[in-house]
Image: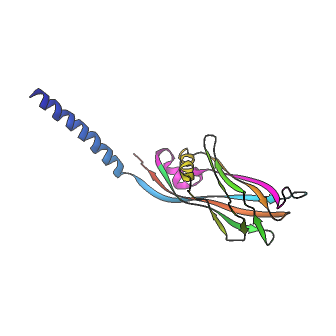
Amino acid sequence: MKTTIQSLVMLCIVAGLVSCEKIKNLADVEFDTTMDTNLNIAVDQPMKSTLAGYTYEASATLDPTSDPEVKKYADKIKKYDITSLTAKVISVSKENVKLLQGTFFKIADATDNTKWVLTEDFDVVVGNSYTLGNDNGEWAVVQRILGRNAEFTVTSEGSATENNITIIMKVSIGAKVTANPL
């Protein structure tokens, strides 16, 4: 009898804890956001650095809390789920420009980093986008970086076919954010 009462009390406690968590989860807030930063790529080399092109390096910072909704829930965010990640050409100062195979894009903070390497030449034409895919779990790394709600760096480094050019590429991270205000 004593064992039965103890078992019932334990069952009630466990059920109560599980129910509280379920009730708390009902207060979850989900919203979609897109965080952008522009990479200002300037290719200005005195001579070709490789047989095929001119090298460059560009970086920009992105702060997730610059988004008003993210800032509002910053301390209460449970997770980020990446829905898209792209680098889109916004402007280019010359025609017939390519970023060469081996050029890469990188997202990093002090703890984590991940990168995407062009496996073929990329035509730099206004409106063209390069998808920063999730073939090797890159988005999980970006989700961890976003989860810190701190500024991080977006970088591109590589070679272009033309010299004395300026390219602006907008790197956009689309995400579904889950927060709980409780």
In x, y percent, where is residue 76?
Answer: 46, 46
**Does 166 sit above or below residue 69?**
below
Position of residue 74 in the picture relative to residue 152 (left or right): left
In x, y percent, where is residue 151?
Answer: 63, 47
The residue depicted at 65 percent of the width and 67 percent of the height is 129
Of all residues, the one furthest to the left in this rendering is 1
In x, y percent, where is residue 85?
Answer: 58, 59
In x, y percent, where is residue 43?
Answer: 82, 59
In the picture, residue 95 is in which quadrant?
bottom right
The residue depicted at 72 percent of the width and 52 percent of the height is 59
The residue depicted at 76 percent of the width and 56 percent of the height is 158
Q: How is the image coloured?
A: rainbow
Residue 60 in the magenta stretch? The answer is yes
Name the one closer to the observer, 136 or 112. Answer: 136
Name the one closer to the observer, 166 or 133. Answer: 133
Residue 166 in the magenta stretch? The answer is no
Position of residue 22 in the picture relative to residue 176 (left or right): left
Q: Quadrant of the N terminus?
A: top left
**Part of the protein shown in magenta:** 49-78
Position of residue 142 in the picture relative to residue 182 (left or right): right
Q: Quadrant of the C terminus?
A: top left
